[in-house]
């Protein structure tokens, strides 16, 4: 069984501060990620949300913040209520010549039940590519795009 983590990197036409705010502020997260009321980027903070591939197959996600380096790194555990396995999601941020670069690593996917196709690594890859490459990108770059258009 493959145990390599899933890793995706994305550059955004936005500041690191803008992306950090998007991944740590519950009001911002709700717009591009999941609705996690009262989210706090503080080690030990526990949160949960419900999500799944289709309406009839929804899962309660149980998460706990494990590491925070303000403006640079956010990590939390990710597991499912009633299922074996536990994983770790890490967001690493850096500035790359004026662009915010995000590296997302999701490790431990191999610990989830192999018999459930919803927990297949390919599904996580597809989901994270959409979340990081599309919804977060659109969210953090929208203010930049509005400012650019208003200059014409």
Image (cartoon, rainbow, N blue to C red):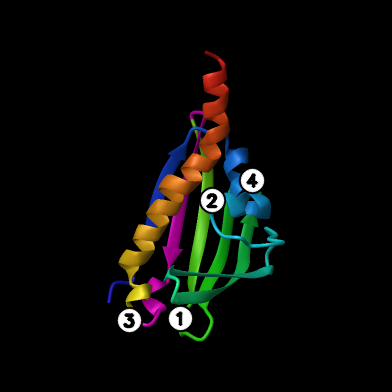
On residue 117, the disc is: none
The residue wearing badge 2 is 32
Which of the marked residues, 3 or 1, is nearer the chain's N terminus? 1
SS class of the residue under badge 2?
helix
* Nearer mark to the viewer, of 2 and 3: 2
The residue wearing badge 1 is 85
Mark 3 touches mark 1? (CB < 8 Å): no
- Between the residue at mark 4 and the residue at mark 2, the CA separation in whole angstroms equals 12 Å
87 within the magenta span: no
Q: Which residues are magenta?
A: 97-113
The residue wearing badge 3 is 114
Which of the marked residues, 1 or 2, is nearer the chain's N terminus? 2
Which residue: 67% across, 51% down? 27
Say if residue 33 shows up in the picture. yes
SS class of the residue under badge 3?
loop
The residue wearing badge 4 is 21
Residue 81 versus residue 7: which sits nearer the camera? 81
- Between the residue at mark 1 and the residue at mark 2, the CA separation in whole angstroms equals 26 Å
SS class of the residue under badge 1?
loop
Which residue: 64% across, 53% down? 24
């Amino acid at each position: 069984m493959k145990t390599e983590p899933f890793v995706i990197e994305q550059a955004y036409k936005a500041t690191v501060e803008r992306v950090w705010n998007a991944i740590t502020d519950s009001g911002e997260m709700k717009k591009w990620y999941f609705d996690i009321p009262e989210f706090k980027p503080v080690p030990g903070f526990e949160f949960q949300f419900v999500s799944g591939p289709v309406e009839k197959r929804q899962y309660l996600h149980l998460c706990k913040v494990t590491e925070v380096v303000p403006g640079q790194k956010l990590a939390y555990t990710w597991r499912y209520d009633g299922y074996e396995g536990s994983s770790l999601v890490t967001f690493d941020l850096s500035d790359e010549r004026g662009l915010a670069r995000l590296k997302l690593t999701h490790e431990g996917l191999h610990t989830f039940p192999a018999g459930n196709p919803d927990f297949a690594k390919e599904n996580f890859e597809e989901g994270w590519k959409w979340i990081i490459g599309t919804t977060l990108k659109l969210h953090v770059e929208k203010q930049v795009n509005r400012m650019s258009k208003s200059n014409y």
